[in-house]
Image: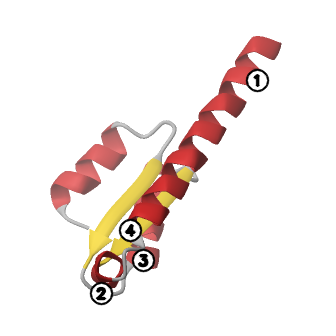
Amino acid sequence: MNVPSRILVVLYSRSETFFCTMGGRGSEDTFAQMQRLARCVPIASCAIHARDMQQDVAVEKVARFVLMIKDALAACEREAVAR
């Protein structure tokens, strides 16, 4: 993970979502680094590989990612209202 990304994760870690694009393998290691730096488990994560773009899988992955975020935020809202 590059230095600017590390700084963003450390400075702005609250409710996290992790998204990365790559040409090959490595999302698991990258997400593990981000999780350690943020000191929290992400509410959603999505890794788009180059092959996903070639096989038209990327749109599905991003749609699932967005739904995970919406569901997590809705759950947070329900918790806040219940307090």
Where's residue 3, x and y in %?
18, 59
Q: Is residue 27 above or below residue 37?
A: below
Circle 4 Cα neighbour tier, 10 Å, few/some/many (<14 / 14–19 / ≥20)? some
Residue 52 vs residue 45, the one in the foreground: 52
Q: Earlier in the sequence, mark 4 or mark 2?
A: 2
Left or right, 58 with reference to 2: right
Q: CA distance from mark 3 to mark 1?
A: 32 Å
Instruction: Name the residue carrying label 1.
Output: 79
Q: Earlier in the sequence, mark 3 or mark 1?
A: 3
Q: Residue at x 34, y 48 (%)?
A: 9
Circle 3 Cα neighbour tier, 10 Å, few/some/many (<14 / 14–19 / ≥20)? few
Instruction: Name the residue carrying label 2.
Output: 24
Number of numbered callouts drawn: 4
Where's residue 42, x and y in %?
54, 51
Instruction: Name the residue carrying label 4.
Output: 58
Residue 36 vs residue 75, the one in the foreground: 75
Instruction: Say what amino acid the circle numbered 4 marks.
Output: Ala
Q: Are marks 4 and 1 in contact (CB under 8 Å)?
A: no
Instruction: Name the residue carrying label 3.
Output: 29
Q: Are marks 3 and 1 in contact (CB under 8 Å)?
A: no
